[in-house]
């Protein structure tokens, strides 16, 4: 190559060139050694004839930015960017050992179904993260899928050349277009471009990459493309107007589910294809192997997180009600921000006033007078000396004759002096009287004969002031060793 960097030359003061690894329409890839880290790297340099085109330089640097943003093992890592002495940009990437799928197909032929699906789904792991970031590859083809080996010996796909398909399509010369017979690698991209991308490379989305994945899966299984032709116009016409070849006609052992997936990817209208890579990967789940199903789960998880983040993004943005002149109908429970920025203080005072009104209503409710129909009992104040002197009026418990003392005559009640105030009725039986009656009932009554022969205990006569009415004295007989009731009212008065 005329613009090749000489072997042994040091680029950027730290990358020593060891040789050429390969080249394409956009640039040349060199093997280099990082002098400070003693690590082998790949150095991709833009072709010298494209340096004069700003779009070519822009697309070349865009590839480095896009690859650096995608944090996935199936994307080639970018370590550094820089410029040569004449201003030619270059990208420093990780060095890969292996070969791309285009060379693998040419050397060994079609792949096994399980292997082909696993490779395509590994590429989807990188692409789904690119689509979440708004990056559309637009130049997917077998030569941009590099098959390398992990440290454990397993094969792994690396997606190369992000974001340069638009520039690559513009750099195809007229002589290249006329030499497409049997040499698909001369231009390559038109065989994998969707109809809308052929019309305008600007107006495409992730469904253009889904079209390319359908073509790649078709080719990995058959070594042929679904739309073939000897010239670029012939290929474009077939892509836009013709149906693709039958996959099962070229390889009968392919399941119908795989052919249906490929046909879904190759629909002419973007809205008729899979909406995203999660749907595409899910359609291959019934025929996928163990390794491929792990890739499907990762793809679905990335798509699910992106959808969840997108659903939360609109709700996080505050509503601006000043843009609407008329009334706005809002869903129940919607939170509406204040209309003016300076009205927050007024709204705070209104809120405090409302809270005070609610508190006042609660106080009035609990302190309101209780009517006859209210089942709530008022809180009784603590008993005072005057209140304790007057026992509460309750219904008297009738006493049976056997409960009365046998050997003690009932004293006659003392008649109170007649005054202008009528004499109140006898106080009812209290709880203390009930306790006294219970104690008396516990003692078994003796026969009259035995009681007559037994000596009787002396009776103590006491005169106590009555608490029922001032000026009235009641005489009570208290047998010895008899517990005295707490209440001073006469329990035997009737």
Image (spheres, grey):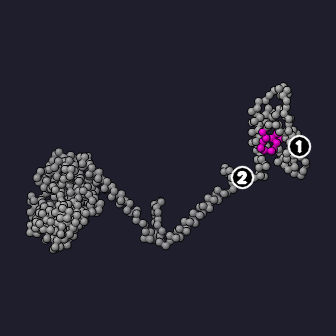
Quadrant including the N terminus:
bottom left
Residue 402 appears in the figure: yes
The residue pinned by badge 1 equals 414
In terms of secondary structure, what is the magenta stretch mainly?
loop
- Label number found at residue 382: 2
Residue extending furthest top?
449
Task: Provide the residue span drawn in magenta.
Answer: 483-494
In the displayed structure, does residue 338 sit left or right of residue 311?
right
In the displayed structure, does residue 233 sit left or right of residue 391?
left
Identity of the residue drawn at 17% across and 66% down: 15
Taking 143 as reference, is 400 above or below it? above
| Residue 406 image-quadrant placement | top right
Residue 273 appears in the figure: no
**In the image, residue 492 lies in the stretch drawn in magenta:** yes
Between 199 and 469, the residue placed more toward the observer is 469
Between 222 and 110, the residue placed more toward the observer is 110
In the displayed structure, does residue 327 sit left or right of residue 390?
left
* x and y percentages locating residue 345 in the rendered image: 52, 70
Quadrant including the C terminus:
top right
| Residue 129 image-quadrant placement | bottom left
* x and y percentages locating residue 231 in the rendered image: 11, 62
Dot 1 crowding, Cα within 10 Å, few <14, some 14–19, many 20+: few
């Amino acid at each position: 190559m005329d613009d090749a960097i000489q072997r042994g030359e040091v680029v950027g003061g730290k990358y020593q060139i060891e040789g050429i690894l390969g080249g394409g329409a956009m640039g040349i890839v060199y093997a280099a050694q990082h002098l400070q880290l003693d690590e082998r790297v790949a150095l991709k340099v833009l072709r010298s004839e494209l340096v004069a085109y700003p779009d070519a330089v822009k697309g070349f640097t865009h590839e480095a930015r896009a690859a650096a943003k995608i944090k996935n093992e199936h994307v080639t890592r970018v370590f550094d960017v820089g410029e040569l002495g004449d201003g030619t940009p270059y990208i420093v990437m990780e060095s890969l050992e292996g070969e791309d799928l285009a060379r693998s197909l040419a050397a060994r032929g079609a792949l096994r179904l399980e292997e082909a699906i696993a490779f395509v789904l590994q590429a989807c792991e990188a692409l789904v993260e690119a689509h979440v970031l708004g990056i559309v590859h637009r130049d997917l083809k077998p030569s941009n899928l590099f098959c390398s080996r992990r440290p454990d010996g397993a094969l792994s796909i690396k997606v190369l050349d992000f974001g340069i398909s638009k520039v690559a399509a513009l750099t195809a010369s007229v002589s290249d277009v006329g030499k497409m017979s049997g040499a698909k690698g001369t231009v390559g991209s038109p065989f994998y471009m969707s109809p809308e991308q052929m019309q305008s490379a600007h107006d495409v989305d992730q469904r253009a990459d889904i079209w390319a994945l359908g073509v790649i899966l078709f080719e990995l299984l058959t070594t042929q493309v679904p739309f073939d032709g000897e010239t670029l116009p012939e290929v474009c016409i077939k892509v836009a107007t013709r149906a693709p070849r039958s996959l099962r006609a070229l390889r009968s052992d392919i399941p119908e589910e795989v052919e249906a997936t490929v046909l879904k990817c190759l629909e002419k209208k973007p809205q008729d294809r899979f909406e995203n890579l999660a749907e595409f990967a899910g359609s291959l789940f019934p025929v996928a192997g163990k390794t491929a199903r792990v890739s499907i789960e990762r793809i679905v998880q990335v798509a699910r997180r992106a959808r969840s983040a997108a659903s939360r993004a609109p709700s996080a943005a505050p509503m601006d009600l000043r843009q609407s002149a008329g009334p706005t109908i809002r869903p129940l429970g919607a939170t509406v921000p204040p209309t003016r920025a300076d009205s927050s203080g007024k709204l705070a005072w209104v809120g405090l006033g409302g809270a005070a009104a609610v508190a006042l209503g609660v106080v009035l409710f609990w302190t309101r007078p209780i009517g006859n129909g209210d089942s709530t009992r008022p809180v009784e104040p603590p008993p005072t000396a005057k209140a304790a002197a007057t026992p509460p009026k309750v219904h008297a418990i009738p006493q049976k004759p056997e409960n009365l003392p046998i050997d003690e005559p009932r004293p006659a009640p003392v008649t109170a002096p007649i005054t202008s105030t009528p004499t109140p009725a006898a106080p009812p039986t209290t709880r203390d009287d009930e306790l006294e009656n219970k104690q008396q009932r516990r003692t078994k009554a003796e026969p009259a004969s035995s009681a007559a022969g037994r000596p009787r205990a002396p009776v103590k006569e006491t005169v106590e002031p009555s608490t029922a009415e001032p000026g009235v004295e009641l005489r009570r007989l208290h047998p010895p060793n008899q517990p005295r009731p707490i209440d001073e009212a006469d329990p035997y008065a009737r």
